[in-house]
Image (cartoon, grey):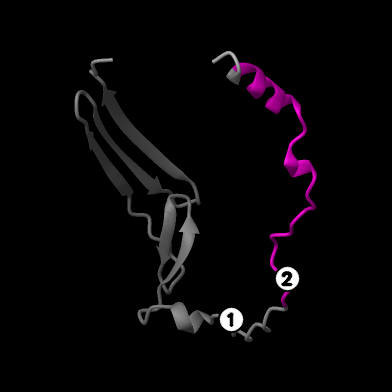
């Protein structure tokens, strides 16, 4: 045991063999990439549904716009639930209603309860 500690200290203080070697490159050689195939842009006719409605991003997320230009103002919502082992419960809900002038009103509620042993 007495011989191991001085040997470890001597080994830690001597320069390592990693300094003696030269750098080894691990990067791949430069390769030219194949030319990208031309891609035609999407047309509105490719993605539009047959009833004439379109979709745009509104204040509450994706919003359907009818053919006459009126936006969908129905409320959209979500419900969450959680459960746990040894003490965790969670419940939550929210609703967002787009307004006619481009704004929105949103309400959400939630509750968390933790009764763990630690």
Furthest residue to the front?
Answer: 3
Q: Is residue 57 magenta?
A: no
Magenta residues? 5-31
Checking the image for residue 29, the label placed there is: 2
Crowd tier of the residue under label 1, counting other residues whose Cα lies within 10 Å: few below 14, some 14–19, many 20 or above: few
Q: Earlier in the sequence, mark 2 or mark 1?
A: 2
* Secondary structure category for the residue under label 1: loop
Q: In front: 58, or 89?
A: 89
The residue pinned by badge 1 equals 41
Q: CA distance from mark 2 to mark 1?
A: 34 Å
Q: Judge from the rendering whether residue 113 lies leftward or rightward of residue 105; answer left or right.
A: left
* Secondary structure category for the residue under label 2: loop
**Residue shown at 69%/67% (left/top)?**
28
Give percent across and percent down for residue 58: 47, 55
Q: Is residue 29 magenta?
A: yes
Q: Judge from the rendering whether residue 113 lies leftward or rightward of residue 12; answer left or right.
A: left
Give percent across and percent down for residue 18: 74, 43
Give percent across and percent down for residue 89: 22, 28
Residue 49 lies in what quarter of the image?
Answer: bottom left
Q: Judge from the rendering whether residue 63 lies leftward or rightward of residue 110; answer left or right.
A: right
Crowd tier of the residue under label 2, counting other residues whose Cα lies within 10 Å: few below 14, some 14–19, many 20 or above: few
């Amino acid at each position: 045991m007495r011989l191991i500690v001085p040997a470890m200290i001597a080994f830690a203080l001597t320069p390592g063999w990693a300094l003696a070697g030269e750098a080894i490159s691990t990067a791949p050689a430069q390769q030219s990439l194949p030319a990208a195939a031309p891609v035609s842009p999407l047309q509105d006719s490719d993605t539009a549904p047959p009833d004439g409605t379109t979709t745009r991003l509104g204040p509450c997320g994706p919003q359907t716009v009818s053919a006459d230009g009126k936006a969908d103002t129905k409320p959209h919502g979500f419900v969450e639930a959680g459960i746990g082992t040894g003490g965790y419960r969670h419940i939550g809900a929210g609703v967002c209603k787009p307004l006619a002038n481009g704004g929105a009103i949103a309400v959400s509620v939630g509750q968390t309860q933790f009764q763990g042993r630690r």
